[in-house]
Amino acid sequence: MTKKEMLYEGKGKKLFKTDDENLLISEFKDDLTAFNAEKRGNESGKGALNCKISTEIFHLLEKNGIKTHLVETISDTEQVVKKCKIVPIEVIVRNVATGSLIKRLGIKDGTVLPFALVEFCLKDDALGDPFINDEHCLILNLVQNEAQISEIKNMARKINSILTPFF
């Protein structure tokens, strides 16, 4: 497979076209970012570590019936992935109250939640990735209907139940 021109560069990876219009090469970078990339650095080997972790997680999900875009890992830092449409929603699943949740709701840090809480953020660095709700998703045309929102939440909880014992 031939790596062609770069399509996209994000904080943690680059995506390249290939000779197959349905496949891309995802290359993990050694870049470090924090606070929506306001703070930057570089750590040799980070890309390889992220690629290895990503590969393990995708294999675990596939083994448990969750479809992923991974086709194969082709180097220490590269994966062949299926080309797909990205929905600009960051899905956050919380099992324990911490971080922004305790600041927003006044819950004690470390409180085990009675069920997996699913929250959404709009993936938009310029806006600071704001929290959004189901209706925002509909208004912004990020999803077509409420059934898609339910599907995203159900999938997130299923993935959470698979990954929680892994970590």
Image (cartoon, rainbow, N blue to C red):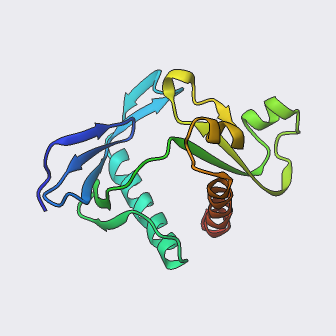
Horizontal side of 130 relative to 73 (left or right) equals right
Image spot of residue 16 (x, y percent): 22, 47
Say which of 14 and 67 sits in front. 67
Image spot of residue 91 (x, y percent): 61, 48
Q: Is residue 121 above or below residue 143?
A: above
In this figure, what is the number of numbered marks? 0
Image spot of residue 19 (x, y percent): 13, 58
Q: Determine the residue positioned at 78% across, 50% down.
A: 96
Say which of 50 and 145 sits in front. 145
Horizontal side of 102 relative to 142 (left or right) equals right
Say if residue 133 shows up in the picture.
no
Quadrant for the C terminus, please: bottom right
Quadrant for the N terminus, please: bottom left
Say if residue 62 shows up in the picture.
yes
Horizontal side of 145 relative to 10 (left or right) equals right
Q: Is residue 144 above or below residue 157?
A: above
Q: Determine the residue positioned at 66% across, 58% down.
A: 147
Say which quarter of the image contains residue 9: top left
Say which quarter of the image contains residue 137: top right
Say which of 92 and 33 sits in front. 92
Horizontal side of 18 relative to 43 (left or right) equals left
Image spot of residue 99 (x, y percent): 72, 36
Q: Determine the residue positioned at 77% across, 37% down.
A: 101
Q: Is residue 28 above or below residue 127?
A: below
